[in-house]
Amino acid sequence: MAPNMNPYVQPPFALFLGGEIKIVSPELVTAELPVRAELGNRNGVMHGGAVMALADNLGGTACAANLKDGQSTTTIESKTNFFAAIPVGDVAKAECTPLHRGRTTMVWQTKITRGDGKLAAIVTQTQLVLTTKPK
């Protein structure tokens, strides 16, 4: 079965995280994620893995918004820089923009801020563009 590459339909894991996609376009994807206790670490702030998962989902969504019929995508590289913690009870706001959109790879940068606007993390990821072979 071919994966659902409709950028407006979020995958089950994104729904599990609980974020809300606000904007989807080939140039920009934004989302907000309330940082509930289940997404926190032992220090009462958003777990680094949850930060990375939010960004990974936005990068995949952004790439999907740029795909042609018969194409899908997968993450092949991701790098995260953490700058400030996001406390449980706050809202993580994410904005994903393209750095490169090629035929076989796309590179996306996601900036994640806290509710007060302070930069919390920047995630840069590379998405591989896959073409489904006709049967």
Image: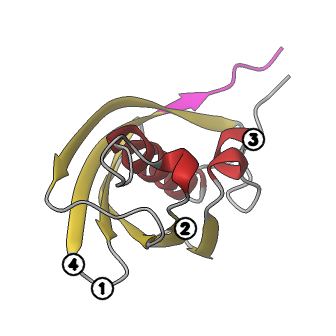
Left or right, 37 with respect to 86, comes to right
Which is nearer the eye, 83 or 6? Answer: 83
Tell me whether circle 4 and circle 1 mark residues in contact (CB < 8 Å).
Answer: yes
- Residue 108 lies in the magenta stretch: no
Compared to residue 116, the image places residue 40 above or below, namely: above
Q: Which quadrant of the rendered structure holds the N terminus?
A: top right
Query: Upstream in the sequence, badge 4 or badge 3?
Result: 3
Which is nearer the eye, 120 or 9? Answer: 120
Report if residue 60 is visible in the image: no
Which secondary structure lies at badge 4? loop
Give percent across and percent down for residue 20: 64, 68
Q: Which residue is drawn at 24% across and 60% down?
A: 85
Q: Which residue is drawn at 54% across and 65% down?
A: 33
**Which contiguous range is marked in magenta?**
129-135
Which secondary structure lies at badge 2? strand
For disc 3, the marked residue is 12
For disc 4, the marked residue is 118
The kind of residue tagged 2 is Pro
Front disc: 3 or 1: 1
Question: What's the mark number on residue 34?
Answer: 2
Tally of marks: 4
The kind of residue tagged 3 is Pro
Tell me whether circle 3 and circle 2 mark residues in contact (CB < 8 Å).
Answer: no
The kind of residue tagged 4 is Lys
Which is nearer the eye, 90 or 18? Answer: 90
